[in-house]
Amino acid sequence: AEKLPTAAGRVMQRELDYLGKAIDSGPTPRIALLGGSKAADSVTIANNFLEKGVSEVLTGGVVANIFLIASGVDIGKPSTEFIIQHISEYEEVIDSARKLIDNHGERIVLPTDVAINENGLRRGISIEELPTEHAVYDIGLDTLVSYVEKIEKAGTIICNGPMGLFENPEFAAGTRETFNAMANSKGITVVGGGETTMAFNQMGLSSKIEHLSTGGGSCISFMSGETMPALEAMRRSKIRYESK
């Protein structure tokens, strides 16, 4: 970019167009579904989305557990220990999630019930029944119905992360049904993140989505609102060579 004119290719341009419009100016209401196990990234993404005017952030997976803990809910030893083991800056992430709840309140939508793994079988319990000695593996059925209704009414849907441990058929319902709702939605659906893309492909829903990101970590950085060196280099190149 310093030596020669530099521009985005068609794949990158498509990524930027869809992600940028979905976050900043897509049809309203704009909602986001954030789930999966990469909760630290998702807390940062949630902050950027809410600052950009996304109406609601619906949470599932480990992301939901993080926000439940931040809101004062004891989710139980197995799920809490899993988070502590897999997030290096646990206290900082919980503190960031707590600040988002304080600042944005009901725009961060938490599960009202969850599915736990009880000896390999699915059992639904309400949030009021927590803590539990069993690991939380999926959103509950009441939460699922509520999320599907919100998806059906949305003008723009941005999804990053499954709602539960979809690889296990016992706990795939939350992910399967929310993803089906997105595929059948009249709104614009944009999907980012490797885990999410894999789930859409496995479920045979990729062709029904407006945009399935192939950007991986770069997509996460963009959704987080981070400065991206490649884009900055292209901006500098444009300014430099237009002035000649």
Image (cartoon, rainbow, N blue to C red):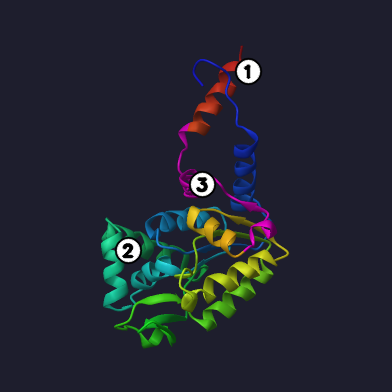
Mark 2 to mark 1: distance in Å? 46 Å
Mark carried by residue 219? 3
What is the number of callouts on the image? 3
Q: Residue at x 68, y 57 (%)?
A: 207
Q: Quadrant of residue 146?
A: bottom right
Does 241 sit above or below residue 164?
Answer: above
Label 3 amino acid? Cys
Dot 2 surroundings within 10 Å: few (below 14), some, or many (20 or more)? many
Helix, strand or loop at mark 2? helix
Q: Say whether disc 2 or disc 1 marks the residue closer to the N-terminus.
A: 2
Does 155 sit left or right of 219 as displayed? right
Give coordinates of residue 33: x percent, y percent.
Answer: 53, 64
**Which of pointers 1 and 3 lies earlier in the amino acid sequence?**
3
Q: Which residue is mark 1?
A: 242
**Magenta includes 211?**
yes
Say if 119 sits above or below 149 in the image: below
Dot 1 amino acid type: Glu
